[in-house]
Image (spheres, rainbow, N blue to C red):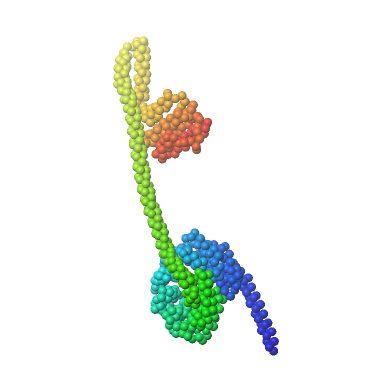
Amino acid sequence: MKNIYTIFLLLLFVFFGCTQKNKFNSTISSNEDSLSYYLSIANDFNLSREKREQFNQKAFSIISNQSDDSLNNVNLFKVANRYYNMDNWVDFKKTVDIILEKAIISRDTISKAKAYTYLGDFYVSQAISDSAFLYYFKAEKMFLQHNDIKNLARTRLNKAILQFNEGDFLGSEVAVFNALRAVKGEKASGIVYESYNHLGLISSELGNFDRAIEYNSKALASIDDKTIPAVFQSKATSLNNMGYVNQNMNRHDKAITYFREGLKQENLKIDKPFVYAMLLDNLAYSKFKTGDDSGLPELFYQALQLRDSLQLTSGIIANKMHLSEYFAFKKDTVKSLQYAKEALNESMSSKNYRSVLAALKRLAIIEPQNASNYTKQYIHINDSLQTAERKMGDKFTRIEYETDQIKDENIDLVAQNRNLVFLFTGLGVLGLFIFVIKTQKAKNRELLFKQQQQNANAEIYNLMISQQNTIETGRIEEKKRVARELHDGVLGRMFGVRMNLDGLNRFQDELAVNQRTNYLSELKNIEQDIREISHDLNREKSELINNFVAIVDGLFEEQKKTYKSKLISIVDSGIRWEAVSNSVKINLYRILQESLQNINKYAQANIIRVEFKKAEDHLILKMSDDGIGFNVKTAKRGIGLQNILFRTNECDGVVDIKSKKGEGTIITVTLPIE
């Protein structure tokens, strides 16, 4: 029956084992790309370290292929945490360096500050205290700048623990008070608990046991089961600290009470085995001091065995020192000397010089014959330790000072750069303002010059018109005078002759009659001719009566006299020049003058053709030549062409220039007219 029951249990085990295995494999298959799944498995302490590292590496690979954002950094921090829990410091450092690089590029100061705290943790693990302190200090400044209270307090607490471990107790105490000051009024019972707990340790080391009890009491009172998980075993830790302080005060009975109460905490050996071992060792030591041998030295051995399994070097040293003292009391010098020397060797190996001093002091008592030698070593190491602790404290202070100094210098440099930027910006604005003013003045001068030039052109044109008017007026007056003379003088006298001849009609002979008739007929013809001449002189048909045309004709005559080129000019008789404004006329005249000048200077033309014509409500001036021509696109626009364009724009007109090398040039100016 027993065998059947055993086989049945075995079958059940195999069945459920296979089921769980299939379930596990199925879960892996369905979640092989699930980041959260890999991160969860990587933090499962029931798995082997190798297995956890594999899953953490898979999680890291997924994150590396994702886009850079704040969530990406959060996941990388999770990966780093898991490497930290595995004591995989190489991959931990690599991951943190990647986070820091990304944070610097993206200017993510929160991630940057958190990365600094992780680097501080890394250098603590490597026992490089100054580098650890530097990164904690940098993180502290950044958290303070962003008013990140909890991270600020946590970083200050990390600094305090680091300073405590290096023997800088006063600096550690200041750092803890700064952490408490940061979370004052905040819900941060975990940080408050750790701060008071640490202040208790500092006070114990400084020999101020009453204050140590006060701080440990505050730590116990601050424990909140809702915010501090029971797995942390905070109460057991504080009870051990209270007992330790009473132990140092030689109040061993009271110390035993605290140690026993601490050992009663649920799941202590599973959750915090090192605290359990510490309570066992301290309980055994206080029982030994009260003369209670019950359970001794088994309690010492039990604590030592657990500490050996956990590789807790400092705990092992303390345990062996207690065993040495216990066996010395029991007159077992061999075992006492054995444990004291083992404690000394392990202290030297781990560079725990405080424990070295305690071991040397114990050995001097056990071996009085070698006491002088141990004392010399004690004094030498104690002096070196004090010097090292003082240097480390000074180094921490110097790091803070130099970092703040660099920061102040950077702030000053930023301020100087900002002032320089403001100065150069101000100078630039002032220079731009002066440039605009000068440009505006130049434009105003240019406009004034153009206005003066336009007025001068108008005056010149008016003078030309006035001169032409004077000539025409004199000509008209002369014509009228001649007409009057012909009409009043010659016709009057001829009329008298005709009347006298008419009086000869009294003679009736045939000869006289014929002569009279001939004379009268001839006089009538003369009278008619003179009358026609008089009428012609008073008629203003000539184109010379139009002053602008006369001026243009004068320009053409001058061109023909001066240059060999043949000039052909055509003026549309349908143009009503009296309706064209003087400004348009003077600009047309200047455009024509400029064009002829350019042709004469550059074109080498044989024939020049100028044509004025009217097209609906536009007046067109077209000038062409058969000269060498030029490339319109590449040719530089000289003053002549610019003047033509400028004058055309003044009249709201359009210029069209057509030219090719070897094919002459055609310039067409189209101006609107009423």
Name the quarter where the C terminus is drawn: top left
- Compared to 622, does 518 lie above or below? above
Provide residue 212's location: percent of width, then percent of height.
Answer: 41, 77
**Residue in the image at 42% along x and 61% along y:** 403
The picture quadrant where one finds residue 238 is: bottom left
Locate residue 155 relative to residue 530 in the image: left or right.
right
- Compared to 161, does 577 lie above or below? above
Closest to the observer, 187 or 358? 358
Residue 268 seen in the figure: no
Provide residue 547's location: percent of width, then percent of height.
Answer: 37, 30
- Compared to 251, does 29 lie above or below? above
**Residue in the image at 37% along x and 36% along y:** 583
Q: Residue furthest front?
A: 369
The picture quadrant where one finds residue 34 is: bottom right
**Residue in the image at 51% along x and 76% along y:** 340
Task: Count up the numbered dots.
Answer: 0
Provide residue 231's location: percent of width, then percent of height.
Answer: 51, 78
The picture quadrant where one finds residue 9 is: bottom right
Name the quarter where the N terminus is drawn: bottom right
Closest to the observer, 292 or 30? 292
Closest to the observer, 98 or 90? 90
Residue 439 seen in the figure: yes
Closest to the observer, 367 or 252? 367
Provide residue 65's location: percent of width, then percent of height.
Answer: 57, 62
